[in-house]
Amino acid sequence: MIENDLNSKLKLSKDEMKKYGYQVIDHIVDHFETQKDKKPVALATREEMDSLLAEDIPNVPSPANDVLDFVMKQIIPHSNIVSHPKSYSFVPGPSNYISVMADTLATGFNIFSGGWAASPAAAELEIVTMNWLLDIFGFPTKKGGGIFTSGGSMANLTALVTARRIKCGSDFSKATIYLSDQAHSSNIKAIKVIGFKKEQIRIIPTDIEFKISLNKLKNIIARDRLEGLQPFCIIASAGTTNTGTVDPLEDMANICKAENLWFHIDGAYGGAAILSENGKQLLKGIERADSLTVDPHKWFFQPYEMGCLLVKNHEWLSSTFTEKPEYLRDIEGNQSEINFYDHGIQLTRRFRALKFYMSLKTFGLDSFKKAITYNIDLAEQTEALLRKSVLWEITSPATLAIINFRYNPIQQNLSEEELDRVNQSISKKITDSREALLVTTVLQGQVVLRMCLINPRTTLEDITNTLEQCEVYGKEELAIINEQN
């Protein structure tokens, strides 16, 4: 037991550290072993959390084991288990134990991964793993580059800052940027953050497959040029969050080449699917991007936080973000010794590359390929299962492990309003039961259920069990509607 007295050095003895550390590791291992038997959803109001956790600042020490026990009993259980096999919503975070331990090492040794002088090994490992990703996506490894970020939002922001500088210089008052109505919201947020006004943003409608309309894109670019504006960037989606849809990347790359526009691809969700044969075909043309966002903490199975931006020319990043304050003048190094604080927004950076490196070295890329292929196949099996039922309707077919569907029994002749009500009710009831996390989205004005199946530990049996429970809730809501009618 760690003594309950003032400890101004903030130190523990060797034995105390080992004992405490083993307890933490035991909790993590137990979580990995038992999470499938737990409920994936945590439900609580702000009032409930306040009553449980709100307290005045602790001025005096508490026994470390008591604090740990409190965290394990009162804090950890009140968070969704995003790596649970029945966590189907948003984009799950399957994670893996090797990467968790790698994060523990990086944090435990408190490695600063901003500059070469602070940690040559950390900088070199980021270069090595970045080259792996450049190779995977067909980017040039000698000239290309990139940077690990906190996530896709920061990667998209970094890309657009770079694109604005290269294509617009210091005056972007007439610049216009183009993206589809299915593009991730982080792109709109990034565009606003870097100073673009609403009237400079062009939201292009999508077709019935939720792909950007090329004809409308070309027409709007032409109109903007005729009005004296400066088109400078197109953002494509390589796996939208809603449906997994991939925009026509080759065609969009051709437009960018013809119009001299920056081509940014947001592959935060779907980019990793390039490791499967199915995904490689859908992502044809991804190598033609000027910049590409991918999120290892999604379908590369890394723990949060880990996003990534890849670019065709690493000098684009350094020329955009390099600053030379006096306090860093002694550690600039030479051009081959990359300071990653010169390639992005953050000066202080954690050692994110370690977990990607260790997990890829441990499991091998072929294991990642097999896992991603399994996910894509699982979504297609789910689609086949739904199509055999008289109770379900596919609203967007399985694409890159995402499928959208709704409860719509044959012969019921429900109105669109009633169908929306039933499916919203199913989502609420299954989530309130805490047995599965299955929420809705809206496609073409319809409320639909959405499954994102990127967890390699999710089984078809998990999905079947969930759908059976959803059918029960659907029938319950139908009975209420029929009674009201």
Image: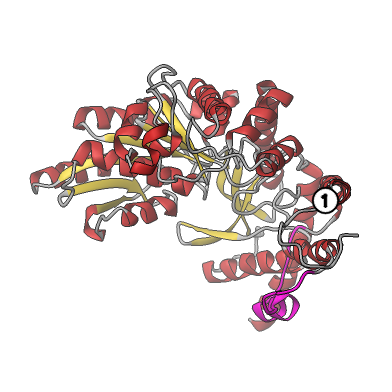
- As rendered, which of 72 and 309 lies closer to the eye? 72
Q: Position of residue 251 (x, y in %)?
A: 33, 30
Quadrant of image for the N terminus = bottom right
The answer, for residue 209, to whether it is visible in the render is no
Horizontal and vertical percent position of residue 36: 83, 50
Type of colouring? secondary structure
Q: Nearer the viewer, residue 132 or 81?
A: 132
Q: Quadrant of residue 437?
A: bottom right
Where residue 109 sits in the image (x, y, percent)?
Answer: 67, 40
Residue holding disc 1? 24
Residue at 83% in and 49% down: 17
Left/right placement of residue 223 relative to residue 46 reads left
SS at mark 1 in the image? helix
- Residue 167 vertical placement versus 89 (above, below): above
> Is residue 365 visible to the viewer in this orientation of the structure?
yes
Q: Looking at the picture, how far across and down is residue 368, in whole percent?
A: 67, 28
Report the magenta residues as a range: 40-61
